[in-house]
Image (spheres, grey):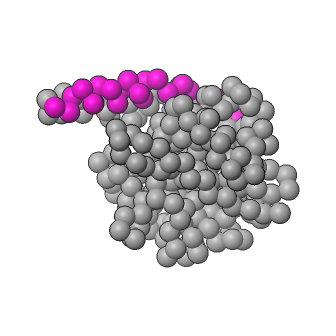
Amino acid sequence: MNKIIVLEIKFKFDEIEDAIYPTVLIDDKNMILIDCGYTGFLPAIEQVMEENDLKCEDLTHVLITHQDHDHMGSLYALKQKYPHIQVIAGKKESPYISGKLKSLRLKQAEEMQPYLPEEQRAFGLEFCNILKNVQPVEVDIEVQDGDYFEWCGGCTILETPGHTPGHISVYLNLKQVMIAGDVAVIENGELVIANPQYTLDPKEAEASMQKIKKYDAKEIICYHGGIFNP
């Protein structure tokens, strides 16, 4: 039994409808959740898991592609409720997820704050506070480029920096599916670099985009946008 299930979690932010797409990998021994949403999203994750005939208590691992709050915001709550779940992250990203180093997204937001137009400063301050409230979690398993796991018929960890320095993606070898995290998003039917204004290294981000494209995946799963069929 090897399954890839893409979860769709719909929500509203300031009356704007949006969605995120965490992914679950299932085989006979493991159930891995890839990314886990914003702070406070654990009930939504549990609900959408149940809608797909899955249970969070059956998860063996949660893999965090990178440190951003929309990907690890609910990690602390998930780990508190289901302490058996092992946390996996890239070796370069791990210190930020565990809180050993200050969030680079928070650092970026704080540095931008003095330069924001007056009408945007309240939002900027709120955003900084949201990032400060993300609770760190120890990483159990650190991975790096080329690491191989037998999950779901076999998969390879890819280092795909740019959006953040330690961002990782996962390629499902047998199924030819790329789980891209925030390497890319889908806009107007095209695959483009995710959130250029928040990308910490645009040059690396472009290189990572080209890297995932070289795999000729049949499907590319974007955390923002869902499934892209090349």
Residue at image point 67% right, 40% down: 46
Q: Say left or right for 212 vs 172.
A: left
* Image height of 52 relative to 69, above or below: below
Q: Residue furthest left?
A: 118
Residue at image point 39% right, 70% down:
190
In the image, residue 154 lies in the stretch drawn in magenta: no
Verify whether residue 125 appears in magenta.
Answer: yes
In the displayed structure image, the side of residue 87 where residue 219 appears, left or right? left
Nearer the observer, 50 or 98: 50
Q: Position of residue 123 (x, y in %)?
A: 27, 30
Position of the N terminus by quadrant: bottom right
Task: Give the left or right position of residue 168, taking residue 165 as reference.
Answer: right
Residue 207 in view = no
For the record, the magenta segment spans: 119-143
Vertical placement of residue 131 versus 55, above or below: above
Rendered location of residue 92, percent (x, y): 53, 41
Residue 206, quarter of the rendered image: bottom left
* Residue 43, picture quadrant: top right
Q: Residue at x 32, y 34 (%)?
A: 108
Instruction: Judge by depth and name the residue closer to the eye, 36 or 86.
Output: 36
Where is residue 168 shown, x and y percent of the image? 55, 51
Residue furthest out toward the right: 28
**Residue 120 visible, this angle:** yes
